[in-house]
Image (cartoon, rainbow, N blue to C red):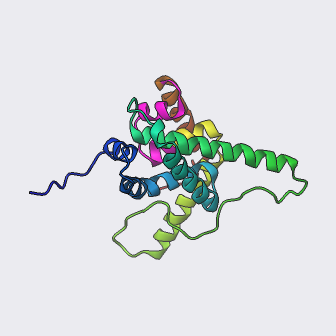
Amino acid sequence: MLNNRKKSDEELIRELQAGRNEAFDEIVDRFTGQLHNFIYRIVGNRTVAEDLLQETFIRLWTHRDKYREIARFSTWLYTVAGNLAKSELRKQRIRRYLSLSSGSGYSRDSEDEKVFELPDKTMDPNRDYERRNIVIRVEEEIQELPLVFREVVVLRDVQELSYEEIGLILKIPLGTVKSRINRARQRLQARLKDIHQ
């Protein structure tokens, strides 16, 4: 009888560490979407997010033996991705500072991609348009948050990670995680109070 049980993340990384290279492909398949979404929401640019996602997987491959099962594998991988995203933001600030032109730096993509799915069984173009605008507005406001608030909101409300996982990824105490999430949500609520749903 075949065992169709899905392997845990930790089992896959142990297999990769033991030399089963196919486990790397399984990890990439499992984490690509959620990591890209996480990185994009930190840096605000899809192309840069794709590059950082590739760099995250390169780091996973080259440093696969450094993972120890002290924390969940997903926490370790999110930490790598988050550190790369923060490093990119620092580089962007330096480039903007050094540049003489006001048009430098990265801006939000204008790609017409759905980031959130808003299921609606009725075909009402006006309502769909309104909802799409709300999603875009929320995304823009998240991008305007200071990084310390943006990180926690994305990890909690978009990636749906637990408070404990967020604390491990960002290396901050649980109380700080909760405080930052609360403050970030308050800021978003204040800035989005004109939206009526």
Vertical placement of 184 versus 34: above or below? above
Figure check: 171 above or below 39: above
Residue 76 horizontal/vertical position (percent): 46, 38
Kindly identify the residue that appears in the image at 64 percent across and 68 percent down.
Answer: 110
Measured from the top left, where is residue 145 in percent x and y? 63, 43
Residue 190 is at least partly visible in this image: no
Residue extending furthest front? 19
Query: Which quarter of the rendering shows the N terminus?
Result: bottom left
Direction from residue 131 to residue 9 in the image, left or right: left
Is residue 48 in view from this perspective?
Answer: yes
Instruction: Name the residue at the right extreme.
Output: 100
Q: Nearer the viewer, residue 133 or 158?
A: 158
Instruction: Residue 125: give x, y in percent of width and height.
Output: 47, 75
Task: Tell me what residue is drawn at x 81 percent, y 57 percent.
Answer: 104
Residue placed most toward the observer, 171 or 28: 28
| Picture quadrant of residue 72 | top left
In this picture, is 187 found above or below 112? above
Is residue 12 found inside the magenta-colored segment of the image?
Answer: no
Q: Image height check: is 122 above or below 109?
A: below
Of residues 120 and 112, the one nearer the viewer is 112
Please state if 127 lies on the left or on the right of 1 as rendered. Answer: right
Query: Residue at the location (46% across, 57% down)?
Result: 32
Q: Is residue 116 left or right of residue 13?
A: right
Whether residue 30 sits left or right of residue 3 in the image: it is right
The residues colored magenta run 154-173
Q: Is residue 165 magenta?
A: yes
Count of marks overlaid on the render: 0
Q: Main secondary structure of the magenta part?
A: helix
